[in-house]
């Protein structure tokens, strides 16, 4: 398997860094779908660690991993802040342009946290998607999650968290408040994407840890109840907001198994 960095791609007028992982596709006449990894609100390519490569290797699919605008090594946020519709902007403006430029059709979306929500919005808009693996997804705002976000803001302002996150982001303060300010905006309390779920016809795998500090199992219940296609749930005990790290082997097996079932 070959891995290399493709320095930049332009989408919605912004320069984004991305990583392409070559899969071991054994079907040259009917190529396997491409996996698209969509990171969490404070995430980046490198914060996925080895998970995308492992999934690509085990499934045979190629994978695209990219830093969203304002995160990682992509272009630093130029605005003072983004709107409460930032996930819709990512799903309906940035992602379609990226896929069109790279000629990727009917991908399998693997999203974590905000990235999982972006995947659901994209598919719910009627875009062609082969399947979605949604890890710790959000479909509505919970007080439980807002408390977790308030706690991490306090840690960012009183601990070495900026130094630790600064290893991954060009401007760690802008990246942090890009995410934190929106989630703590009083107007964001009404954010809800349940209306897009019934139009999602592709298979969905939704994964969440029972100790997730940003969301409860009500998120998974809402997805299972409302999506238009088949839906599988994986609920993990002793697991926080990053199941692919906290329960790495179980999540890897679940995601790869899901991908193989829908190929």
Image: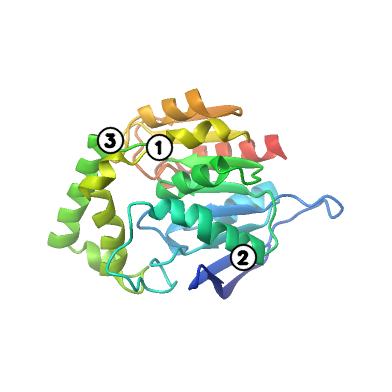
Seen in the picture, residue 239 relative to 230 is either above or below; the reply is below
Callout 2–callout 3 Cβ contact below 8 Å:
no
Numbered circle sitting on residue 139: 1
Query: 36 or 15: which is nearer to us?
Result: 15
Q: Could you tell me which residue is drawn at 27 percent across and 69 percent down?
A: 80
In which quarter of the view is residue 161 placed?
bottom left
Q: Which residue lies furthest to the left in this view?
A: 158
- Give me the C-alpha separation between circle 2 and circle 1: 29 Å
Residue drawn at 33 percent across, 52 percent down? 84
Q: Nearer the viewer, residue 134 or 142?
A: 142
* Residue 93, horizontal then vertical, whole percent: 52, 59
Q: Locate the N terminus and report the quarter of the image it occupies.
A: bottom right
In the image, residue 249 lies at what x, y percent?
51, 41
**Image location (x, y in percent) of residue 85:** 38, 52
Q: Does 62 appear above or below 221?
A: below
Of callouts 2 and 3, the N-terminal one: 2
Q: The C terminus appears in which quarter of the rendering?
A: top right
Instruction: Name the foreground residue: 259 vs 17.
Output: 17
Q: Which of 213 and 175 is in front in this view?
A: 175
Instruction: Between label 2 and label 3, give the one nearer the viewer.
Output: 3
Residue under numbered circle 3: 142
Residue at 31 percent of width and 34 percent of height: 211
Name the mark on residue 20: 2
Q: Give the secondary structure at mark 1.
A: loop
Q: Determine whether, in the image, residue 142 is placed left or right of residue 169.
A: left
SS category of the residue bearing label 3:
loop
């Amino acid at each position: 398997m070959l891995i290399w960095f493709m320095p930049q791609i332009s989408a919605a007028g912004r320069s984004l860094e991305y990583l392409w992982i070559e899969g071991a596709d054994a079907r040259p006449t009917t190529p396997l779908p491409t996996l698209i990894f969509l990171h969490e609100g404070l995430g980046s390519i490198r914060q996925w660690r080895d998970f995308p490569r492992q999934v690509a290797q085990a499934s045979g699919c190629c994978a695209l991993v990219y830093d969203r605008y304002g995160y990682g090594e992509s272009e630093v946020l130029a605005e003072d802040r983004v709107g409460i519709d930032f996930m819709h902007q990512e799903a309906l403006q940035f992602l379609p342009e990226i896929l069109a430029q790279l000629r990727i059709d009917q991908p399998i979306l693997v999203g974590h946290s905000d990235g999982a929500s972006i995947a659901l919005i994209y598919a719910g808009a009627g875009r062609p998607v082969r399947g979605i693996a949604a890890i710790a997804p959000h479909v509505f705002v919970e007080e439980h999650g807002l408390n977790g976000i308030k706690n991490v803001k306090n840690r960012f302002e009183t601990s070495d968290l900026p130094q630790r996150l600064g290893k991954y982001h060009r401007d760690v303060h802008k990246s942090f408040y890009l995410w934190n300010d929106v989630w703590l905006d009083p107007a964001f309390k009404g954010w809800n994407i349940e209306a897009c779920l019934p139009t999602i016809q592709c298979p969905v795998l939704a994964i969440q840890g029972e100790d997730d500090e940003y969301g409860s199992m009500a998120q998974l219940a809402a997805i299972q109840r409302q999506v238009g296609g088949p839906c599988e749930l994986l609920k993990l005990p002793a697991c926080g907001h990053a199941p692919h790290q906290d329960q790495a082997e179980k999540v890897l097996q679940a995601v790869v198994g899901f991908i193989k079932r829908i190929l």
